[in-house]
Amino acid sequence: HILTRMNEDSLMHAPEFVIKPRSHTVWEKQCVRLHCTVSGWPDPRVVWYKNNVALDPLANPGKYKIESRYSVHSLEINNSDFAVTSFCIVGPVSEYGITFQTHIVDKFGVSFGREGETMSLGCTVIIYPALHRYQPEVEWYRDDVLLSPSKWTHMHWSGDRATLTLTHLNKEDEGLYTLRVTTKSGYETYSAYVFVRDADAEVEGAPAAPLDVRCLDANKDYIIVAWKQPAVDGGSSILGYFVDRCEVGTTHWIQCNDTPVKFARFPVTGLVEGRSYIFRVRAVNKSGISRPSRVSEPVAAMDPADRARTSAPWTGQIIVTEEEPAEGIVPGKPLDLQVTEATKNYVVLSWKPPGEKGLEGVMYYVEKCVSGTDSWQRVNTEIPVKSPRFALFDLAEGKAYRFRVRCCNSAGVGEPSDPTEATTVGDKLDIPSAPGKVIPTRNTDTSVVVSWEASRDAKELVGYYIEGSIVGSNVWEPCNNKPVNVTRFICHGLITGEKYVFRVRAVNAAGISQFSQESEAVEVKAAIGGGILHASPAPPYGITVLECVRDSMVLAWKQPTFIGGADITGYFVDYREVIDGVPGKWHEANIKAVSERAYRVSDLKENKKYQFQVRAANMAGVGIPSLPSNTFLCEEWTIAVPGPPYDLQIREVRNDSLVLLWKPPVYQGRDPVNGFYVDIKEADAPEEAWRGVNTKALEKTYTKVLIRSEGEKYVFRVRAQNKAGVGKVSDVTEPVPALTKPGTKEIVVDVDDDGVISLNFECGNMTPDSKFVWSKNYEEITDTSRLSTETKGTKSKVVFNRPGEEDIGVYSCLVTHTDGASSSYTLSEEELKRLLEISHDHKFPIIPLKSDLAVELLEKGRVRFWLQAEKMSNNGKVDYVFNDNVKYKMNFDKNTGVIEMTMESLTPADEGTYTFQLQDGKATNQSSLVLIGDVFKQLQKESEFQRKEYFRKQGPHFIEYLSWEVTPECCVVLKCKVGNMKKETSALWHKDRHQIKVDEIFIFAANSSTPLKITSTDEGIRLYTFVSYYNDLLQVTWHYKDSAIAFSDRIKSGVVGEQLWLQIKEPTEKDMGKYAIEFYDGKGGLRRTVDLSGQGENRARVAGGLPDVVTIQEGKALNLTCNISGNPVPEVTWLKNDREITSDEHCILKFESGKFASFTITGVNTSDSGKYSILVKNKYGTESGDFTVSVFIPEEAGSKKK
């Protein structure tokens, strides 16, 4: 029934405006709403246009709002500005109620080509439903610039496939290509990047070709040609560029400059007015010239005004632009003369013609003058300039010039213009500074996103070149061959799994900057999400009110649970009024994002109720808004106690502790906040389980909370207090389990070899977007005067520049985009003192010494200075300093650490202070010894004495000096002891300075001899005599029966002290006879004799009677007797087991009549068994007899027999 009433005739009706939209004039920033009513069947679809371009509300969110209700259509424009003027609406269209769906499939991907090649890009387009003869609008864009068909680009649409063919690739063709398919229902796009690599150089090592050659400021006399420098210089710096021109219609190229120009702009002169030209540029380095660039678009050498007239469309009217020339009038002065461009190769001037009208064809003369002089020189003496622009060449670089211009015509030359200010010839445009920090981020398996900090203070910046290198290869390849004018670029075509580093250069017409610092290495690997780097954040939550006054409220909220993989750059707050429970329309509270999680919403109405929502934003965009908050009443708070703290954060979660941070309340109450209380409870516990962490109010906005139960989940809240009392509680934190996550590491303090103190933190679970955030007392460190931050890979540290008391505090490090990796370190006064001591030891290390410097005397009177070090390396060095002057080199035994220096002697000049200086790397030490005054004199005297003694003892010398003694015979003996006597040494005696002859000494020695005596020894018989003085030169011979004795092993002679002896071993009867000792002085001699006849028979002997073995029964008596002979009567000694025994009741020993020795044991026992000996001795000799006694028990003997 309703349908029948709406379309009673059941026929189709074309669209028709019932009420047309009307024009509006509004103030800027004011909202405007346009309305219209349209009829037709089926319901027409209304499309709104601005300047013949269909509006897309999704492309400008918040700007346009389109609504259609019951044939009434409206367009709402928010914050109108001048850009929305000239707005028009084209009538509605009816497409039978059809909504087209467009799908782009079979897409082209990221493509790589080489200069000179042909490349085709294509996509299949599916439009549903498919209408016969309906053709969508198909457009191609490069870097958001619409492409038109040309000899370089061919486009084709087959009805279902769009193709773009690049007929001859050049680097100008590199960029982001976009296919846009537009239907009446909207449009679909697809984009992919095309990279164009350089063609091989014709000369090895030559640079790549320049690109993007364009013609600027074309006029009658010259054209300025501009270009962009190539990314590849061939391995050596580009020396400059050659510009070539070719007249359109010919193939003859002419080089425009004789010497290369470094500036990427050049004015070409010598052109023929009215003719068209094309240009190309070649780069040159020391290896050769590059291939030529792609030629420029043709440009005519003519006045810009003439060009405008020739290219203007036909309007159906004839416009008179010049008056008839007046004859015979000299033109006036040119106006507004200025230097528009100045390089070291040329200067460009521009001016305006004189103000008079109707002058005959005016031309110009240009004059120059060196600054500081008044000598003007005409530059173009032969041919005047036809256009009000001119380029001057051949100016001296570094000199300052002024310029002026004169007009001329057939009537004459006019007055000069006002001169320009002095212009120094040189490049006014500086080469850009190197870009800042380069940050690579994983993207796909073959691409990496590279972002960097823009070059500072760069003028006329053209763009940036990016290069990449596989780590360790030291080979750099360009990532783009066409400069990009953004600070973020996706580098494609990389090898999966390899690690790359990147660097960036900036480009302007003056040249290419230095490279930036190399980035950190990044592995080419798909990011999480298969190359989707980031997403917009999830909505914030937990919106609360921190303060409320009459017309504003301060809100706080919690960070989104998901931030999209990138840092949140800010928040947007919306508010709406709630009237009688019905929410109104949302309004933006802030246009610029706020970085804090708290914001004051202003311009509210007192006693009105409001709801709020918050959106978070990151580099990927603005996220969806949070759920609307509770409804809050805007009324001024008047309570005396503080409002709630906010922004509670939990860090450094461990099994037994965690750190809680918060921000103080915005609303202070009647008095300032003077402390905080922290409450804790188990997450599942009821509200009454809240308990206080601290009993005394905390002054700081952080605290370390000790945990009772490992693994338990806890929640926290904070209250602030002032003099009036304790205020509102904060919002409760999310539950957190008290668990130390696997891989958790702590901050480590380190003092390096240079004494630099640093705090170090390492995180093993970082993401590409993770950052280290260092804080002191949980406030981010921004002042770098005392602390420097260094981050490399997964490690970061803060270095104390000048450690002092100002640095005492709690240092913490938080790693963003992780599961809460954080740690802290408390630098107390005691810890700082300890670290400073270690730092001092590392800065100024001491080599430990086992012994300090000492001195000792050596032979020859040499003086040795020495000390011993605990340990020194092979690189250790030692210097000896005497009275601040380095004097001698040292001997250094690096195995023992002994360092010594030896001086042959001491002189008075050696008195002073001796110092050994040690150095081993940075470690040093020194030890000193003071030798001054009596100490030095005593050492010098002792050294000199020892030196003289050494030389004295090199020959025969007195060990004991001459002395005398009186012998028992009342002889006076003079004697001394001499050392180091040699064969050629002679001893000279003097008396009253008269030499005593040697024979007299010999006579004295001989006369002092005692008569020969005989004594018995263990070996035999010894004959001997004593002399009062003996000398080795004293000639002594022994005689037997008047013949000199031939000595052997049995008969020997010798001297012991002053005793001269002859030893006869085992004497026999053959040795009896007369012996003599003879002293010989070379002339005569003295003889002492003794008779040994019969002396052998008188020697003590054991004649016999003793058995070898005696076996006797226990209890029996043993009696042995032997015969003894010798004169004098020998002494008898009995031995048992080589020990002397004496006579007693058990063992009776007797020696009777000087001949018989008896041995009697009255009753033997087993203890009497053993070896027995009898020893007899008199002056002629000693002899012994041995026997063995064995005592047995009768029973043992019987058992043995059995």
Image: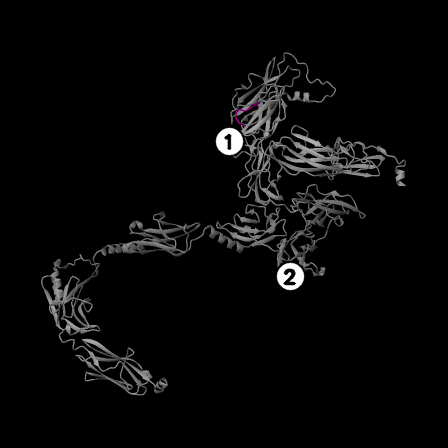
Image coordinates for residue 887, horizontal then vertical, percent: 34, 48
Magenta residues?
Answer: 253-261
Q: Can residue 742 be seen in this view?
A: yes
Which residue position is annotated with label 1? 287
For badge 1, the amino acid type reads: Ser
Marks 1 and 2, how far apart at CA: 75 Å
- Element under label 1? loop
- Magenta stretch mostly in which secondary structure? loop
Does residue 67 lie above or below 633 as drawn? above
Which residue position is annotated with label 2? 709
Disc 1: CA contacts within 10 A as few (<14), some (14-19) or many (>=20): some
- Element under label 2? loop
Q: Can residue 962 be seen in this view?
A: no
For badge 2, the amino acid type reads: Ser
Image coordinates for residue 597, horizontal then vertical, percent: 68, 48
Quadrant where the C terminus sits is bottom left
Does residue 463 lie above or below 973 as drawn? above
Q: Mark on residue 844?
A: none
The numbered mark, 1 or 2, whose residue comes first in the sequence reads 1
Q: Quadrant of residue 1083?
A: bottom left
Image coordinates for residue 511, horizontal then vertical, percent: 56, 32
